[in-house]
Amino acid sequence: MKKIFFIILIMLPLLIFNSCEEESLSDNIFNYVTFADTNYSAGVDVGGNTTVDVVVLASKVSGSDRVFNVTIDPSSNAAAGSYDVPSSVTLPGGKQEGTFTITLSDVDLGIGVNNLVLNFEEKEGVFLGGSTNVAYTQNCTEIEVTLDIIFDNWGGETGYEVKDALGGVVASKPIGTWSNGQVSASEPITLCDGRDYTFTILDDFGDGLSDPADGSYTLTVKGVVKVSGGGNFGPSQSTEFDTK
């Protein structure tokens, strides 16, 4: 009987230790904080801004406020200066939910999707959920602009492209679209209102619109000629313009 008693005395600390370790592990697993949604989306008006409320949820209630730091993941491709993200979010005492607000602005958004990926900074004793992604674009009000070209004798050498403020090609026609001997062309182009662009006309031979006589081109926006040129401009000629 004494031997059994001594064995129990020896084993008891180990049992208590294992029990505490399991309880601590259990506490960490169930002390859980995560973003309520993995994806948010928004549109930003030209020259304006908008806000997105990001909700954070916790598995436990605390009697005091809890603060969690928010970080921006390096995989984000959002335009610099187009977002303002708070450095932390507070879950009020007695609550399992908190909210922080992101401000998104029309700063070099271009035509693509801006992805802002957010994480929580590691915090001892808390199991953290995965990332959330805020995807946003510049709202586009489409307008139609007109490109008019009077060719020299070599329309087959001519092409053009229109790039947005970030350098993305948003409209184009390759060299060879038109025919040699063709006199003129009128090309409707759909763009977004209120944005900045660059128009480039191309010539395959490298003498512009100049043989045997000078040709010309104009780009008209809302009845106003924004781009014009012609003659011997070499292999290409670029002009910045806006659709305001």
Image (cartoon, rainbow, N blue to C red):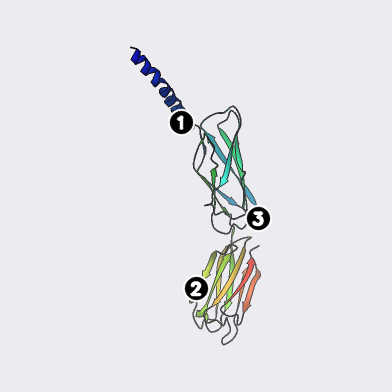
The N terminus lies in quadrant: top left
Measuring from the top left, give residue 153's x and y in whole percent.
Answer: 53, 84
Give 13 or 94, whichever is nearer the viewer. Answer: 13
> How much space separates mark 1 and mark 3, taking CA atoms?
51 Å
Q: Residue at x 61, y 43 (%)?
A: 87
CB contact under 8 Å: marks 2 and 1: no
Give 108 or 194, whichever is nearer the viewer. Answer: 108
**Mark 1 Cα within 10 Å, few/some/many (few <14, many 20+)?**
few
Measuring from the top left, give residue 129's x and y in whole percent.
Answer: 49, 39
**For mark 3, what is the residue?**
47
Q: Is residue 226 left or right of residue 182?
A: right
Q: Is residue 89 visible?
A: yes
Viewer-nearest of labels 2 and 1?
Answer: 1
- Helix, strand or loop status at disc 1: helix
> How much space separates mark 3 and mark 2, taking CA atoms?
32 Å
CB contact under 8 Å: marks 3 and 2: no
Measuring from the top left, give residue 113's x and y in whole percent.
Answer: 54, 55
First of labels 1, 3 by sequence position: 1
**For mark 2, what is the residue?**
174
The C terminus lies in quadrant: bottom right
Instruction: Identify the amino acid type marked 2.
Output: Pro
| Quarter holding residue 54 | top right
**For mark 1, what is the residue?**
25
